[in-house]
Image (cartoon, rainbow, N blue to C red):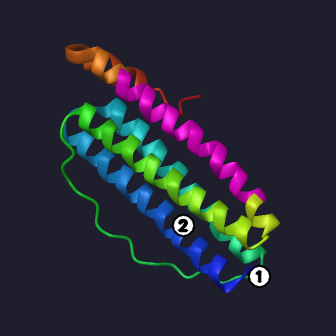
């Protein structure tokens, strides 16, 4: 059974994950308007992943006998600047999510909530991957310079079988 404080914290993380999904979808829409369909595709896949992360926590709260309480999602920006600016934003956002996951884990340790600690281990590992992917793309964009269209094409292959 979840403590009330852990339930509240997990509900907050569900909101963060769904807000991340919404942010990445807004970034994808922006890329579409800038004729960057590959980046838009990558960001749409990322939006789906973030939604899945929110649902993973949603299911966990329910499985532990808690109550999911959905919170409002703030409207994301509509303008994001250059491709480098976009992926700087992705990296910064993922770093904020990593910090939030780490805070949740610390709370689970403090409360001796072993089941939540185990569930959060998956998210800790996932965040290492998320930050690395964003950082790698950011560095590629910096190196690509005027050849960003080649990288856009490569990013468009994400999720393709």
Image quadrant containing the N terminus? bottom right
Question: Is residue 149 visible in the rendered structure shown here?
Answer: no
Q: Nearer the viewer, mark 2 or mark 1?
A: 2
The number of discs equals 2
Residue at 49% in and 54% down: 97
Q: Quadrant of the C terminus?
A: top right
Q: Is residue 92 above or below residue 9?
A: above
The single residue placed furthest to the front in the displayed view is 110
130 falls in the magenta region = yes
The residues tagged by marks 2 and 1 sit, at their Cα atoms, a distance apart of 17 Å
For residue 13, the mark is 2
Rendered location of residue 24, percent (x, y): 38, 50
- Report whether 95 appears left or right of 111: left
| Secondary structure under the numbered disc 1 in the rendered image | loop
- Tell me what residue is drawn at x 65 percent, y 68 percent: 107
Residue at (54%, 68%) from the top-left corner? Answer: 14
Q: Tell whether position 81 is magenta.
A: no
Q: Name the magenta segment's main secondary structure.
A: helix
Mark 1: few/some/many CA within 10 Å (<14, 14-19, 20+): few
Q: Which residue is mark 1?
A: 65
**Nearer-N-terminus badge (2/1):** 2
Left or right, 13 with reference to 150: right
Asked whether 56 or 102 is in front, the reply is 102
x, y (%) of residue 128?
58, 39
**Residue 19 image-quadrant placement:** bottom left
Say which element carries label 2.
Answer: helix
Residues drawn in magenta: 118-139
Q: Which mark is residue 3?
A: none
């Amino acid at each position: 059974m979840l403590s009330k404080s852990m339930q509240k914290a997990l509900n907050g993380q569900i909101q963060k994950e769904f807000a991340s999904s919404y942010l990445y979808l807004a970034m994808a829409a922006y890329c579409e308007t800038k004729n960057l369909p590959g980046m838009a595709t990558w960001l749409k896949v990322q939006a789906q992943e973030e939604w899945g992360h929110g649902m993973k926590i949603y299911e966990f709260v329910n499985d532990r006998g808690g109550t999911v309480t959905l919170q409002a999602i703030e409207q994301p920006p509509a303008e994001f600047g250059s491709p480098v600016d976009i992926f700087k934003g992705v990296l910064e956002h993922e770093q904020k999510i990593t910090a939030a996951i780490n805070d949740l884990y610390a709370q689970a340790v403090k409360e001796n909530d072993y089941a939540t600690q185990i569930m959060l281990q998956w998210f800790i590992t996932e965040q290492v991957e998320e930050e690395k992917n964003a950082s790698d793309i950011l560095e590629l964009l910096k190196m690509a310079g005027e050849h960003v269209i080649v990288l856009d094409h490569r990013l468009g292959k994400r999720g393709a079988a």
